[in-house]
Image (cartoon, rainbow, N blue to C red):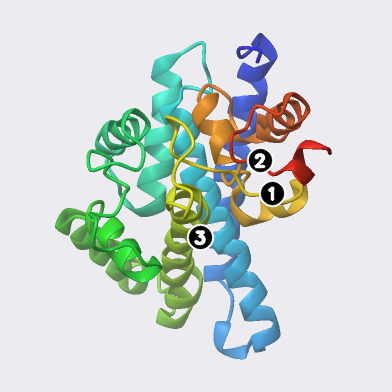
Amino acid sequence: MKKPSKSDNIKGISIALLVIILWGASLIGLLALNATGLPVVLIIPAMLLQTFLYTGLFITAHDAMHRTIFPRSRKINNAIGSLAVKLYALFSYSKLLEKHWAHHRNPASRDDPDFHDGQHRDFFRWYFHFMRGYITWRQILGMAIAFNLFIYVFNVPTINLILFWIAPSLLSTVQLFYFGTYLPHRESEAGYKDQHRTRSNYYGVLWSFLTCYHFGYHWEHHEYPYVPWWRLPAVRRQVSISSRSPEMPASEKRR
């Protein structure tokens, strides 16, 4: 599998900035709407769009953790990653970076900060156990301050904040956890097949993108951590041809 090229520097930073700009423009536009006058058939798609863009923010930060946004400059790469997680929910980039590489070194084990503790195996208990490991009181306080600034300084209606800021960010955590942690790393009856202790989904490229920016191609991500999210479908095709994925069924190998 080829390493990042010079063109990947341009593509990586362009895609990352595009995601951040789209998220910001969408949020500003949605917060300026008269939400009480909108029909539900428009509110729900708007919430889903913002949820998807929130997920894109985190995936952008995740790529920064693997230094795939701008491989030529660690400083620029990390600055974009830090901006993305601050916009997402005031996360500390350095702490997320430390935990994420602990996950890669010890996937689906007691030393994996993303894994369940042996008791919280079902989706909901694992999700809340997962979230407790990342959310801090400092973040909650910061978000509360931001919430009040939006209301009393920028005069944003509370309903807009709930529908287009709070709800999408929370829904995004569910999306990221379900497609990026729970499905890939939960143990099957047959057990884990290799050191990555993960599996990939078998969605087509469009559905893979819509569900979680190809993060569901998780075995490929662990095998080739230097590949950005937008190159994972190409990696998936190459893996399918070579039949290297230990979790890939025979029907998938023939594609």
Find numbered disc 3 in the image and state the secondary structure of the residue it sits on: helix
Measured as percent of width and height from the top left, residue 165 is found at 45, 67
At x 32% / y 47%, what residue is drawn? 114
How many residues crowd around disc 2 within 10 Å: few (fewer than 14), some, or many (20 or more)? some
For discs 2 and 3, the disc positioned in front in the rendered view: 2
At x 65% / y 10%, what residue is drawn? 6
Q: Nearer the viewer, residue 93 or 87?
A: 93
At x 35% / y 45%, what residue is drawn? 86
How many residues crowd around disc 3 within 10 Å: few (fewer than 14), some, or many (20 or more)? some
The C terminus sits in image quarter: top right
Find numbered disc 1 in the image and state the secondary structure of the residue it sits on: loop
Q: Is residue 17 above or below residue 190?
A: above
* Residue found farthest to the right: 255
Residue, disc 3: 175
Q: Which numbered disc, 1 or 3, marks the residue that appears first in the sequence?
A: 3
Q: Is residue 6 above or below residue 23?
A: above
Residue, disc 1: 202
- One can see residue 227 in this view: yes
Measured as percent of width and height from the top left, residue 20 is found at 54, 44
Q: Are marks 1 and 2 in contact (CB under 8 Å)?
A: yes
The amino acid type, in three-letter code, at marker 3 is Gln
Task: Report, in whole angstroms, how far the alpha carbon at label 1 lies from the one at label 3.
Answer: 17 Å
Q: Which numbered disc, 1 or 2, marks the residue that appears first in the sequence?
A: 1
Numbered circle sitting on residue 248: 2
How many residues crowd around disc 1 within 10 Å: few (fewer than 14), some, or many (20 or more)? some
At x 45% / y 31%, what residue is drawn? 80
Q: Nearer the viewer, residue 9 or 34?
A: 9
* Residue found farthest to the left: 137
The amino acid type, in three-letter code, at marker 2 is Met
